[in-house]
Image: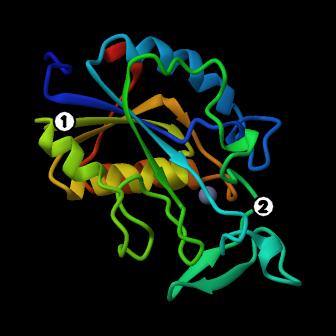
Amino acid sequence: MEWINDHTALLIVDVQNDFIPGGALAVTGGDRVVPIINELQKKFRHVIATQDFHPANHGSFASNHPGKLPGEFIELAGLTQILWPVHCVQSSRGADFHPDLNQSQWKAIFQKGKNPDVDSYSGFFDNARRGDTGLGDYLKSNGITRVFVCGLALDYCVKFTALDAKNFGFETILIADATRAVNLQPSDGEAAIKEMKAAGIKVLTSNEL
Ligand SMILES: [Zn+2]
């Protein structure tokens, strides 16, 4: 089966310095996805990236809630919100894409997490589903029917982006070797893959494409 054609897109989720070892919210092995994604991009005509892009006063940052630490929970936008270290602050180096990530053929970048009052794991909608980045309509208006998802982190932004892609009606495929999990709990990555499969998302590795 030919997986990639003019109606397929590659979505690169949040491959930013703060999610790479050495960054504020480092994902173990996060840098390892960069060469894999660079190879993958060569096969696609439509490559789109998402970027976590928070104001400094973002409600998901533990430091904005006196007495709270990363990993603790609060309520934000009516939802249970895990608190994170300060990360991907607009115009900081941590918010920049990994310097080795090839951006030369990107058609668009969709930024998320700009509203301080709600977190935004998915590249499509914020967690309360009030704000829409426009990614879904963008893909539809470009004739995309099948979406491949890769990037960081598997158990948060990649998972929620893939689930929303599927909900939007796109055939959705996770590229399992082009993502890594935060794994706050050691099995979170595996659980994320299970949840995605249960939602009808396919899982492939880059060498199958
Ligand atoms: Zn964030």
Helix, strand or loop at disc 1? Answer: strand
Using the rendered view, name the quadrant where residue 17 is placed: top right
Q: Which residue is at the front of the view, 192 or 139?
A: 139
Q: How many discs mark residues in the rendered view?
A: 2
Question: What residue is at 31 percent from the left and 49 percent from the top?
Answer: 197
Residue found farthest to the right: 67
Name the residue that disc number 2 marks. 85
- Give the number of the disc on residue 146: 1
Measuring from the top left, give residue 160's x and y in whole percent: 41, 57
Residue found farthest to the front: 91
Helix, strand or loop at disc 2? Answer: loop
Disc 2 residue type? Pro
Quarter of the picture containing the C terminus is top left
N-term mark: 1 or 2: 2
**Looking at the image, in which quadrant does ligand 1 appear?**
bottom right
Question: What residue is at 78 percent from the left and 72 percent from the top?
Answer: 62
Question: What residue is at 20 percent from the left and 20 percent from the top?
Answer: 4
Q: Measured along the vertical axis of the image, is residue 84 above or below residue 137?
A: below
Q: Measured along the vertical axis of the image, is residue 173 above or below residue 3?
A: below
Here the colouring is: rainbow
98 horizontally vs 80: left or right: right
